[in-house]
Amino acid sequence: MMIYGYARVSTAGQDLKEQVGELVESGVEQANIFSEKFTGTTTERPQFNSLLSHVKSHDTIVVTKLDRFARNTREALDAIQPLLDQDITIKVLNLGTIENTSMGRMILRTLLSVAEMERDMIVERTQAGKAYAKKHKVNYREGRPKRRITPKYQAIYDNLKHDSVRVTAKKFEVSVSTVARIKKQIESD
């Protein structure tokens, strides 16, 4: 019987250290922790799939929170139910142990429904905040803020008068797409 851990954050800017630390503190060996920076909105997560290929009957999977499996009830049930059917125990550090019993399955469905409702409420609040900002803030604009044209960016643009985008990108050690975006922004302003 092996104990595996799974840690996931949704964006590259987030850090896995806290989750991995909690898993190690709970008794999972570092070598048995599968971690990734990958959105929960898709079930095609490489490390999660790798974990599923390692786990066997009577093993345990430990996660810090239930929503590390998936973002909604249906996806989580689709991922967890086959594990329970193989007599794999799911240990959720902030909730407890979920086993393949009628009580365990009921608790799982209830908790996943609450987690999905929480996620939906976050989306609703975000949309309401955006709507309020659009209505009350004259200069409100969604998305990434417009790039500020620094002297370096101006130099990149000026260099395009004698060099190609690719040569300019290499010369200034930036990506080709960055050069293209700078060019487009300056020419559209």
Image: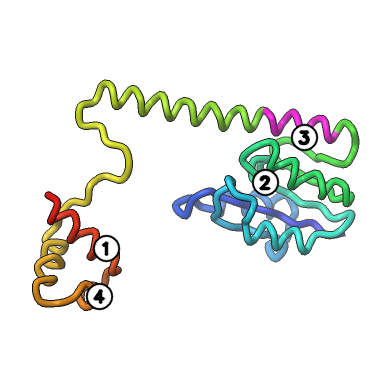
The answer for how far apart the CA atoms under marks 2 and 1 are is 35 Å
Q: Which mark is residue 69?
A: 2
Question: Could you tell me which residue is drawn at 82 percent across and 30 percent down?
Answer: 106
Q: Amino acid at mark 3?
A: Leu
Q: Quadrant of residue 70?
A: top right
Along the horizontal axis of the image, is 13 left or right of 21?
A: left
Closer-to-camera residue (156/188):
188
Q: Earlier in the sequence, mark 2 or mark 3?
A: 2
Q: Is there CB contact under 8 Å for labels 4 and 1? A: no
Q: Residues within 10 Å of mark 4 (few under 14, many from 20)?
A: some
Residue 74: image location, x then y, percent: 70, 38
Q: Amino acid at mark 4?
A: Arg
Residue 89: image location, x then y, percent: 83, 47
Q: Quadrant of residue 153?
A: bottom left
Q: Which residue is mark 3?
A: 108
Q: Is there CB contact under 8 Å for labels 4 and 3? A: no
Q: Which residue is mark 4?
A: 166
Q: Amino acid at mark 1?
A: Thr
Along the horizontal axis of the image, is 69 left or right of 176?
A: right
The answer for how far apart the CA atoms under marks 2 and 3 are is 12 Å
Quarter of the image with the N terminus in it: bottom right
Element under disc 1: helix
Q: Magenta segment range?
A: 104-113
